[in-house]
Each structure stands twice: as structure tokens, then as C-alpha cells.
Image (cartoon, helix red, strand yellow):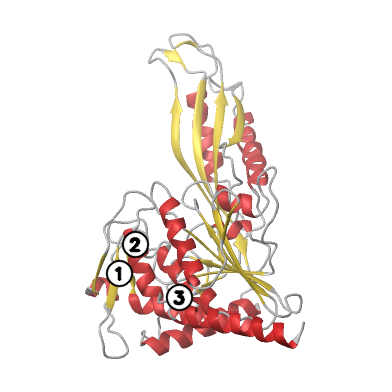
Amino acid sequence: MSEESGRDADSVRSADSERAADFDPVSFLEEAVRIPSHESADEMREFAVETLAANGADPAVVADGCVLAEKRSPEPDAGPHLVLNTHLDTVTPGVPFERGEATEDERGGTAPAVDGPDEVIRGRGACDAKGPLAALLGAFLAADPARGRLTLALTPDEEALSLGAAALTGRLPGTEDRLDADLYVVGEPTGLDACTAAKGRFQATVELSGTAAHAAEFAGANAVAAAEDALAAIRTFDAGAEPHPQLGPPKLTPTVIEGGEATNQVPADCAITVDRRSVPPETAEEFRSSLAEAVRGSLADVAGGDDRGDVDAAVALTDRESPFLEAFATDPDHELVRAVAAAAREAGDAVGLPSERGGDVRPFGAATEASYFAPAPTVVFGPGDLADETGAVAHAEREYVRVREVEAAAAAVADAVAALLG
């Protein structure tokens, strides 16, 4: 590179830094919450793209509506590739934007550590996940990596089938992994804690098939009666399972049962839908196979003994275009975790959050697209809460996020990026 071209590059980087310094994550969030994104993420995507472009980035829309932007250091191969990821969509219905002073419930009954207004932004998506989005945007725009590279990846349908994230990571037929990164920070409401693991979520149906007959006759094979044994197998499925060190035990819950066609007929069919919250290393297929074996074993114990006999069982995973969100876990002592947790504590102190707020290392309470990034080290992080002491926050009519936490989250991610890529 010539001396002149080097000065040109430095000038461009300086201009980009000045524009990024003008970006205010809280102002962005105020606009973002006003944009409906519960039926379509299109308008929210356009706003994010326009914001990135106006602040010196060069975003691209790829892979089923995902937004990508990248910052390469002068030595992109001398350091890690770090991805900042969150989603643009929210759940239904839309809830109006409002900014105001926090109520006692929204403060958690705890006063801020310093004087000044304790404000919140309310509305659908305030914490899930437009608050985290605002923080990650602020950190990305402020970044000036000295080594490695930084990618911002925004997905459009995390609240539905995650087709965007699946396409972005090469998990859909005909797609390729456009990220292939070393480290990931996934924006979700964690109360500024560094979350290193989350359970997966699978859905399956236990299908029981018998033989129809008149209810007055001792004939047929009663699929509904056999559900008693299938439910016993579901109830004891995890007996003796070793708890995961971060996530604890897995959980299997029967949620829907359907069977029978007439009140005077031995039913030939019965179906039980189950919800599985998995822990590593269980995959969706391993779960399906193991549950099928357990249910068949329970039916074999009673075969021929009464009208439950000779009922067949099969277990099928619910059809979906994208892979299920499997569990993930990152070593709590990984440098990514340490960097995010330490930065969160410092940023929280700087904006006057209570000392107990943020910076802990713990699991996350819901399944996320972090599943698609594993086994690469991944931390889920952001302002806001899934629930507080009063009740549900995310996906609820009272969704809110504390303004100070948005500011702290943006500063924390920026500091973590600097520590990892500096």
C-alpha cells in the first residue's frame, strides 16, 4: 500500500468513526419500537439498513432477508472473527411505544445507584429484541478492530422458524455458511448477564395405532387406552438422567392429546404431542429415537393383556423447514465470556445501575438462534428481562427495557469487542 493510499484509508476510517460517534442507541430504539415488526420484518430491516448506511457501514441484504455488515481490521487473519447477532422481528400483537419514568415494578423495587431519572422504554420489542439490537448496532458502529474482523448479522424470523439464520449458517439445502466465525454474541434480554448456555426445544408426536372395533365387543386394540402406558413412558423418560452442569436436567412435557372418532367405538388412533427442552449433547433425532424405544417398551409390557394389546407406536418430529433449535453450552471460563461479563459490570457501574444488576455468568432461559452457531463459543447478552418479579416482560403487554441498561449494553459490547479484537 502506498503512503498516499494509507492516508486515504485512515481518512475514511476517521470519517466513519465520527459518524458512528453520532449514533445514539436509545434514540434508535425509540424509533425501532414504533416500527411494527410482528407480521413482517421488512420495515424494520429497511430502518436497520438505512441506519447502518448513514453511519458509514456498507450493509447487504442476503440469505432470506438477513442483514450483514462487516468491519475488517488491517490484519483480518491475525485475530478472531467475531459476530454480533440478533433478530429484527417481534411477536404479535403490536404494543404502542411509550417512554417514561420507571414504575416500582419496572425498577424491581430497587432505586438506581446514582441520582437522575430512571426511565424505561415500553412497547412490543422493547427488550425482545430491539433493545439488544440498538446495543449491538452501537457497538458495531463504534468498533475499530486492530486485528481480526467483526460482522453484524441481523435475522428476520427468529420468533417463527428461523429460516434466515438457518440459511445464513448453511443449514438449509442449497445454502452456505456465510458466517463461519470463531466467536458469537447473540442479542437477547439477559439483564446484562453473560449467558453461556440454553436448552433446546424440540416438538414431536407419539402416534399410537390400534384396531377399531365395536365398543360392546372384547375386540380391537384401543389406542386411547394405550396412551396411559405411553404417558407413563413420557413421565419416566428422564429418570436417572445426569443433569447438565449449567442447564440442569432436560424436560419432557405432554402438551396435546387427540384420539377416537365415535363414542361407541374402540379407537384405532391416538396422538400425543410432546414438548422437549433438551440439554447437550442430545440432538433432535437422538431424542426421537430414544422416545420411540421407550414408548414401544411400555406397550410391550402390556401387549395381549387387555384391549391395549397390539397397539403400535411411532414417534415423529414435527415437520419444519429449518432445523430445531438445539441446546448449546459454552465454557463459562472462555475469554469471550470473561470479556462480556467484565465489560457489563463496568458499564453498569458507569451508568449508575445497582451493583447486583448485570455481569453474572449463567444460562439463558429460552431457546435462541445461538443454537445454529454452536459449537463455536457463544454468549447471549443484552438489556432487559424475559420476566421480572411481577411477571412476564418479553412477549407480554407490559414489555419494557430500562434506558440505562440499553446505554450500558452498548458500552459493554463495544468494550468486549475492543478487548477481543484490539
SS class, disc 3? loop
On the picture, is 194 further left or further right than 90? Answer: right
Question: In this orientation, does residue 141 appear?
Answer: yes
Which image quadrant for residue 211?
top right
- The residue depicted at 50 percent of the width and 65 percent of the height is 364
Local packing at callout 3 (Cα closer than 10 Å; few below 14, some 14-19, many 20+) is many
The spot of residue 51 in percent (x, y) is: 45, 67
Q: Is residue 353 above or below residue 155?
A: below
Residues at marks 3 and 1, CA–CA distance in whole angstroms:
16 Å
Q: Which residue is mark 1?
A: 121
Q: Is residue 341 above or below residue 89?
A: below
SS class, disc 1? strand
On the picture, is 353 further left or further right than 331? Answer: left
Q: Quadrant of the N terminus?
A: bottom right
- The residue depicted at 50 percent of the width and 26 percent of the height is 270
The spot of residue 154 in percent (x, y) is: 53, 60
Q: Is residue 47 above or below residue 16?
A: above
Circle 1: residue type: Ile
Q: Which residue is mark 3?
A: 192
* Label located before the other in sequence (3 or 1): 1
Residues at marks 2 and 1, CA–CA distance in whole angstroms:
9 Å
Which image quadrant for residue 169?
bottom right
Local packing at callout 2 (Cα closer than 10 Å; few below 14, some 14-19, many 20+) is many
